[in-house]
Image (cartoon, grey):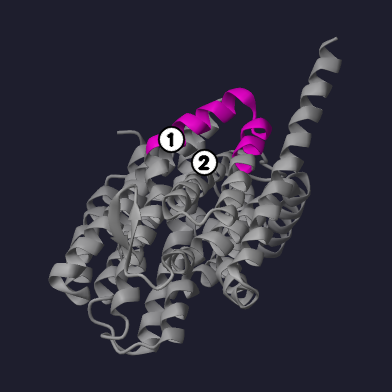
Amino acid sequence: MSRSRLIALIMGVCVIGDSMLYVTLPPSYQDLGLDNATTGLILSVNRFSRLAFNPLAAMVIGRLGYRATAILCSLMAITCTLGYSFVQAPWAWLLLRVMWGLTWSLIRLTAMLITLEEASDSTKGQALGSMQRLVRIGSVTGTFVGGYLLDRMGFRQTALVLGLVTSVSILLAVSLKNSAEPRTTPLATGKKSSDRATGAFGGAVTCFRQGSYVYLSTLLSAVAVGGIFLSTTGVLVKARLAGQATALVFGVAAGAGSISGTVQSFRWLSDILFAPTVGRLSDRLGRHLPMASVYAIQCLAGVLILSTSSMSATVVASSLLYVAQSLALVILSSAAADLKGATHASVSMTLYSSCLDLGEAIGPVLAYNLLGFGLFRSYTLGSFVLGGLGTVWGYMAIRRRALSQASGS
């Protein structure tokens, strides 16, 4: 098995506990002695903590190497998932979630760097898409198995079982090999710490200037889709139900929880089904045209959500929006990988990860503050942002094609 596939599998096993938590904690938090505010913080603090950990991840990987980093991440993921079955105090919950934030920062960057190390310039999109497919198998497992076990065993026992499952990651991590010539760390050897820090910062500034449209697009789409739309799916479904316990979706009666969970699961399932294909397509066509097309689909899906009162149409439009978001992240991560900047790929991928985390962290906060103005206005804002991004990427695609034709003639 290639190192890129192996690290993706490790990452997928590590993420099982986190995915499980988003499904099992909301219905169980009162039984666990938690209040609303604490529960919301537990589910979001890992994203905020990653903003601090992302810049440190490359340094840790450079010092430890791939194999030791993967083993460390596996141990922390096991500790977090098993810990959910025992902790009671809010501070202990928050500590575990911050630990998971560090784990995700490390394992995500490790997986990206190994994948890019093995990929050629013409196959980066396909390679990152394949990585995303394997990782999301773990997310889907955590979601569906976690929900199934919750109804039969309760929260504590579910976390215990999936914590034991996560232990498989240790066996996988031990078999991971370091690269023969590590190229991942932005820290050049033989230099003083101050010189290395200055060089890394300068490389990050240069990389951001070169790819500001990629990083800003990542940030804004994470705010719009991950915040305004995704985090309020349950609110939208409940509003569509209009006080009823169930609604007919293509002739099947379903409640708010089932509808919301099914719609959101399409985001991960689409990674498994379509991510490598979209990545390969962006390798052939370039990043701009596929990205503009994805944003156009998302904008139209947002408009459809706004304009319909049918639950079936709402499910179709929302699912399409989240499927498109998974594909957008494949293309955006590939575009970020094209920006090597003045140092190494770790700089561009760290910036990409931080913009994604920042958007997914502030998005829900913005969304729930906008609820006071009504879902219609907040969803209009989200659709407007996506439409604007599509216009920018479409313009860039047309401009690049015109320049290419002019140079060819």
On residue 327, the disc is 2
The residue lying toward the viewer, choosing from 274 and 108, is 274
Counting other residues with Cα less than 10 Å from the Cα at mark 1, is it few (<14), some (14-19), or many (20 or more)? some
- Say whether marks 2 and 1 touch (CB < 8 Å): yes
Q: Earlier in the sequence, mark 2 or mark 1?
A: 1
Asked if residue 12 is positioned above or below residue 368 in the image, the reply reads: above
Q: Position of residue 113 (x, y in %)?
A: 50, 44
Locate residue 157 relative to residue 27 in the image: left or right: left
Q: Amino acid at mark 1?
A: Phe
Residue at 33 percent of width and 57 percent of height: 14
Asked if residue 210 is positioned above or below residue 232 in the image, the reply reads: above
Query: Quadrant of the rendered structure where residue 17 is?
Result: bottom left
Q: Position of residue 353 (x, y in %)?
A: 57, 55
**Quick check: is 219 in the magenta stretch?**
no
Q: Position of residue 148 (x, y in %)?
A: 20, 61
What residue is pinned by disc 1? 274
Asked if residue 102 is positioned above or below residue 307 in the image, the reply reads: below
Residue at 37 percent of width and 76 percent of height: 96
Counting other residues with Cα less than 10 Å from the Cα at mark 2, is it few (<14), some (14-19), or many (20 or more)? many
Spatial CA distance of label 2 from label 1 is: 7 Å
Q: Quadrant of the N terminus?
A: top left
Q: Position of residue 32 (x, y in %)?
A: 27, 85
Question: Which segment is the magenta one?
Answer: 273-295
Evaluate whether residue 220 shows in this view: yes
Locate residue 22 relative to residue 158 in the image: left or right: right
Locate residue 287 relative to residue 100 in the image: left or right: right
